[in-house]
Image (cartoon, rainbow, N blue to C red):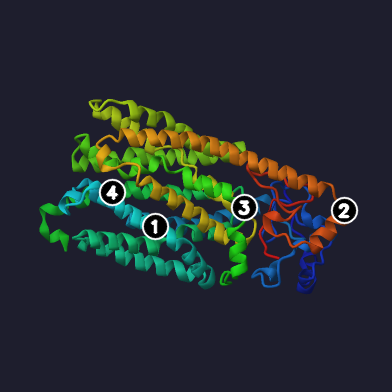
Amino acid sequence: MAHQPHSASASSTSIDDRKYGSVDNKDTLATDGEAPGFTSSTLAGEHVFDDPKLGKFFVPIPEYEGLHRFDPKATWTEAEERCLVRKIDKRIMIWCCVMFFALQLDRGNISAALSDNFLKDLKFNTNDYNNGQMIFLLSFMCAELPSQLVSKRLGPDVWLPIQLVLWSIVAMSQCKINSRGSFFATRCLLGLLEGGFIPDMVLFLSYFYKGAELPVRLSFFWVSLTLTNISGALLGYGILRMRDDPSKGDMHNRQALRFADFWASITDYDNWGLYLIGLCAYIPPAPTLAYLTLTLRNLGFSTFNTNLLTIPSSVLFIINNLLLAQLSRITGERSIVSSLGNVWILPLFIALAVLPDHTNPWIRFVVLTLLIGYPYPHPILVGWNSSNSNTVRTRTVSAALYNICVQAGNIIATRIYNDADKPYYHKGNKVLIGICVWNIVLFFLVKLYYIRRNKWKAERWNAMTKDEKANYLATTTDKGNKRLGSYSFPFVLGSKSLSNILITDFVFVH
């Protein structure tokens, strides 16, 4: 049901009234409309500002940039909200995808180089390649939190362009690699300069999208990564054929975090389960993807065909990525849907572990393509982590911590395939089978944890009288997802709050 905008008098609440928590009980905000930092799942329902006694505890802090526009009485129609979301998609989401495209192109072009005897030309072996990747990932991981804190202090509009320019300079310098030292140095610099970019973009996008909207937008974000792989393969195919002609080779947004806030975010144990998922969930496909071009060359495919044969898995990855995000949105489920990625790849790893070495190369290629094109749960999990964080303070740090765990998992993945196990890495694939099984169990354990936590919080909140609830909100030192009555952990999309007066996502720091 669409809600009509109020007259001008309805939006005349003074800033002083807002500052001190004065909210009117009449004509309050519709539940699909968002006060800054609030999200609701339905248009027709009660909102926290319907109750003036409780609503005053959820008014934005005085330093909030949008306070002068805060009006708990404001309403709008569904059509107006859709128009606004489309405008955000065009003016913000598309450019975030373009920047992510640039990130992946510069860090992933080593794959094309591998297909053209990069290791042989520099007299490296696969262990040198593993070490280079480990150095990159360690540097990337170590830069996550510092970069995120710099961005929070300077603002993403200042810090992100600096990162883009600096890592592009390092990427161009890779043409001068001639030794292990120069290879390791460029991998280290790329990791340091690119680290923090992804969590900062996730935090930035969370300012503009509701919890249920964010995973779908993040799926577009990671689709741009795969489009980069396709574009990079096509560019590599063309560039590698150019050698026949030598002439062609010539909080408010700038508010720094206090250490106490930083430490509170790190010790927020309710996010640790998602960090553990981030550490483990992406380990199985990582070695296969990193070794794809080497494996295809070992199967007898030429350099040029190898680059082209990486495209089908990228296309399948895009399709599965979008389908998985939509499945999560339609079913309202996060944890079980996210586990489908490991369910998908488990039988494929079993096949790789038992296939004899003399198997037809095209059969092995099909298995590898299906494996690498698996349903990628990263957008869902990043959105879930963002929703769970529940304050800008925690969200700033948790986005970086989650990505650090993902990069740590990638570092672990670099040690699973080794030179003694080539060319088909049967031992490594058996290890990955065990990790897949563990990951599937882990998703269900994390969901069970959030079910129990929500039940515990609901019991405590519902046991209070209305006056006790108001007193709790006025005196409690609990913040974010620890605060009773303001949040329930959304192991499913659009989780209902602990009582019908509650909101689903409260992001102001009080």
Residue 9, compared with residue 325, is above or below; it is below
Number of residues whose C-alpha sits closer than 10 Å to that of mark 1, classed few (under 14), some (14–19) or many (20 or more) = many
Residue type at numbered disc 3: Tyr
Number of residues whose C-alpha sits closer than 10 Å to that of mark 3, classed few (under 14), some (14–19) or many (20 or more) = few
Number of residues whose C-alpha sits closer than 10 Å to that of mark 4, classed few (under 14), some (14–19) or many (20 or more) = many
The front one of 387 and 428 is 428
**Secondary structure beneath label 4:** helix
Residue 367 location (% of width, % of height):
34, 31
**Secondary structure beneath label 2:** helix
Residue type at numbered disc 2: Lys
User: Which residue is at 78% across, 72% downward?
Assistant: 14
Residue 183 visible, this orientation: yes
Q: Which badge, 1 or 4, comes first in the chain's sequence?
A: 4
Q: Which mark is residue 111?
A: 4
Q: Which mark is residue 213?
A: none
**Secondary structure beneath label 1:** helix
Q: Quadrant of the N terminus?
A: top right
- The reply to whether the C-beta atoms of the residues labelled 1 and 2 are less than 8 Å apart is no
Mark in front: 1 vs 4: 1
The front one of 284 and 337 is 284
Residue 470 location (% of width, % of height):
84, 58
Q: Which badge, 1 or 3, comes first in the chain's sequence?
A: 1
Residue underneath mark 1:
138
